[in-house]
Image (spheres, grey):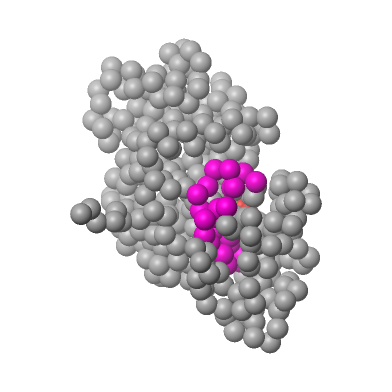
Amino acid sequence: MNPTPAPRLSARHLTLRRRGVAVLDDVSIDLPAGRTLALIGESGAGKSTLAFAAMGLLRRPEVELEGELRVGGTDVVQASERELQSLRGPRMGLVFQDAAAALNPCFTVLQHLSEPLRRHKGLGRAACRQRAMALLDGVGIADPEARLAAYPHELSGGMQQRVMIAIALACEPELLIADEPTSALDVTIQAQIMALILERVRALGASAVFVLHDLALAAQVADRVAVMYAGQIVEEGPAAEVLRRPRHPYTQGLRASAIEFGAERLQPIAGVVPALSAMPGGCRFAPRCMRATARCTERPPRVADGAVTLACWHA
Ligand SMILES: Nc1ncnc2c1ncn2[C@@H]1O[C@H](COP(=O)(O)OP(=O)(O)OP(=O)(O)O)[C@@H](O)[C@H]1O
Ligand SMILES: [Mg+2]
């Protein structure tokens, strides 16, 4: 009998502090192999912080880290820089919001794609070139041979994003982490690029974490959804369950605002997220919550309700 494979991404009581302030507060989550997870929540919720921490890009001493954050078997909180480097590329692919900033302006497309292929797969020059063309073709870039010599500034925004996706997938990683992979793009090509990423992830049998603002998009691309509020996961579960029948008052607010305004940038629920340095001690959402009572001065534990877990005294 095969043992259940270790989750591709797993956080256990992960707390990340910046200058003593908890930007991620006791975050626990598991992403099984071959599944996709959307992280959603208002601006400042800590979605990018969690994604960047998983990428091993937020480390001591820049931030204080407690708890465990595993990619495959490796705890990125404890890993050495060397271990992280061997993780990024072959095990984990990274896609950022702004391809123009993530690509090196001094390197051609071929140089960008060759680096991971040479370093992690040991490919020679000719093999790199062949593989680079196939990768560009795989992300829908026409006439890939002609594009190999291009520098990032010679490409459109959509094409830069496609190149970054090709780089992220070059070594066929088990896990893709994408922080708002399409929000810097024209709406007309957002859906196209998202569909492309999903198609490639599925073709590889990889897992993926997508940081998203758009609930409707989360419902389309993710198997699971984790809703973040002020550095905590308040609700997590199968995407269809969480989005169709949200239980946490915050998720309900998010969904209501998405339906009302069309699921663009979310501006839900009266009030604003309190400053991290002035967070209420109990439920962090309580000051904005219609259902808050005296009980909510105590932090609600995350408990299971069917396939969903949520942290609320009143759900
Ligand atoms: N480099 C930094 N220095 C100090 N504070 C930071 C830094 N980056 C993020 N923060 C703070 O950490 C908190 C979480 O930010 P994060 O960028 O993870 O949120 P987010 O959910 O990704 O928001 P958005 O939807 O706007 O991208 C915010 O309060 C933010 O101000
Ligand atoms: Mg962000």
Seen at 41% across and 63% down, the residue is 11
Q: Is residue 24 visible?
A: no
Residue 167: image location, x then y, percent: 42, 32
Relative placement, left or right, of 115 versus 98 is left
Residue at figure coordinates x 43%, y 70% from the top left: 13
Along the viewing direction, whichever of 19 and 244 lies nearer the viewer? 244
* 237 drawn magenta: yes
Q: Would residue 55 appear left or right of 230 to someone viewing this image?
A: left
Who's the residue at 50% across and 70% down the image?
304
Q: Residue at x 49, y 37 (%)?
A: 198
Q: Is residue 312 left or right of residue 127?
A: right
Question: Residue furthest toward the bottom?
Answer: 294
Asked whether, in this view, residue 287 is left or right of residue 241, the answer is: right
**Does residue 166 belong to the magenta stretch?**
no
Question: What's the magenta region?
Answer: 216-240
All told, the count of numbered labels is 0
Q: Nearer the viewer, residue 211 or 293?
A: 293
Quarter of the image where the N terminus is located: bottom left
Q: Is residue 56 above or below residue 280?
A: above
Q: Is residue 113 visible?
A: yes
